[in-house]
Image: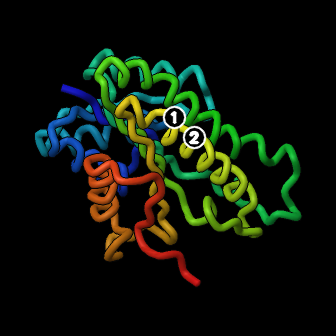
């Protein structure tokens, strides 16, 4: 059995993704900063008969993130699918003229160092399996820079570049890297951007392996 590892576990998209990939036969590793929240999520999943375990780690802490992913693979089986979808902090989203060089340290660590750390931790196991999927979830500022949210616009663009390079470099190893852009808010009543709809879309990207960048719905004009 292989593992679906979710970085940025929460009660919305995270829980929906965990359920969708578990339905396909994967064990579930939930990674988030808050251990108490993880306990609640794993308890809820267990009530549905889903084999899930929480691993506390901060994506801004390379050592803790690496340790969590190694522990997940050792406890649950090798990570075949990695979803990187933590929610950015509000202080990442200052207007561009109010953003200093120091203001970019945390967003870049969050959206670049975090993904690089996570991929480096799971890639050896995927290579041993002979397959794998790397899923990156971003907002619209990843592809359409927004001067009102400079930190995420810059950091998401860098994450996009990294993910695209992975897509091009790892394809011949049967490891598929892809990005899902969610232009607006994730809402339970949204046709294409509800947690369940996005979880299904992510699963389809994993299963179909048809290209790098996908959109949950068209970008608004």
Query: Nearest the camera: 106 or 141?
Result: 141
Residue at image coords 36%, 25%: 126
Dot 1, how many residues are within 10 Å of its Cα: few (below 14), some (14-19), or many (20+)? few
Residue receiving disc 1: 169
Residue at image coords 59%, 84%: 221
Residue receiving disc 2: 165
Q: Quadrant of the N terminus?
A: top left
Find numbered disc 1 in the image and state the secondary structure of the residue it sits on.
helix
How far, Cα to Cα, is label 1 from label 2?
A: 6 Å
Residue at image coords 60%, 41%: 162
Find numbered disc 2 in the image and state the secondary structure of the residue it sits on.
helix
Query: Nearest the camera: 168 or 11?
Result: 168
Task: Find residue 177 and report its horizontal and vertical position in percent.
Answer: 44, 42
Task: Find residue 136 and report its horizontal and vertical position in percent.
Answer: 48, 47
Residue 190, placed above or below residue 202: below
Q: Residue furthest bottom?
A: 221
Name the disc covering residue 1, or none.
Answer: none
Q: Residue furthest front?
A: 172
Say which quarter of the image contains residue 112.
top right
Task: Find residue 94 and report its horizontal and vertical position in percent.
Answer: 76, 61
Asked whether, in this view, residue 44 is left or right of residue 156, the answer is left
Q: Does the CB distance between marks 1 and 2 fall below 8 Å?
A: yes
Q: How is the image coloured?
A: rainbow
Residue at image coords 47%, 43%: 84
Say which quarter of the image contains residue 49.
top left
Task: Find residue 174 and report its horizontal and vertical position in percent.
Answer: 35, 33
């Amino acid at each position: 059995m292989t593992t679906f590892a979710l970085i940025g576990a929460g009660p919305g998209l995270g829980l929906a993704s965990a359920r969708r990939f578990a339905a396909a036969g994967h064990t579930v590793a939930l990674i988030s900063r808050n251990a108490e929240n993880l306990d609640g999520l794993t308890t809820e999943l267990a009530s549905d008969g889903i084999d899930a375990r929480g691993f506390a780690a901060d994506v801004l802490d390379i050592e803790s993130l690496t340790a969590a992913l190694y522990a997940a693979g050792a406890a649950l089986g090798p990570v075949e699918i990695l979803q990187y979808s933590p929610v950015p902090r509000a202080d990442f989203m200052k207007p561009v003229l109010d953003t200093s060089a120091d203001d970019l340290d945390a967003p870049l660590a969050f959206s670049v160092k975090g993904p690089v750390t996570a991929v480096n931790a799971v890639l050896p196991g995927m290579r041993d399996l002979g397959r794998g999927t790397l899923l990156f979830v971003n907002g619209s500022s990843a592809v359409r820079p927004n001067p009102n949210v400079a930190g995420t616009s810059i950091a998401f663009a860098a994450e996009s570049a990294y993910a695209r390079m992975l897509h091009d470099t790892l394809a011949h190893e049967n490891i598929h890297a892809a990005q899902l852009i969610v232009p607006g808010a994730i809402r339970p009543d949204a046709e294409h951007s509800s947690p369940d709809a996005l979880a299904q879309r992510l699963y389809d990207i994993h299963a179909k392996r048809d290209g790098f960048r996908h959109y949950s719905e068209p970008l608004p004009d």
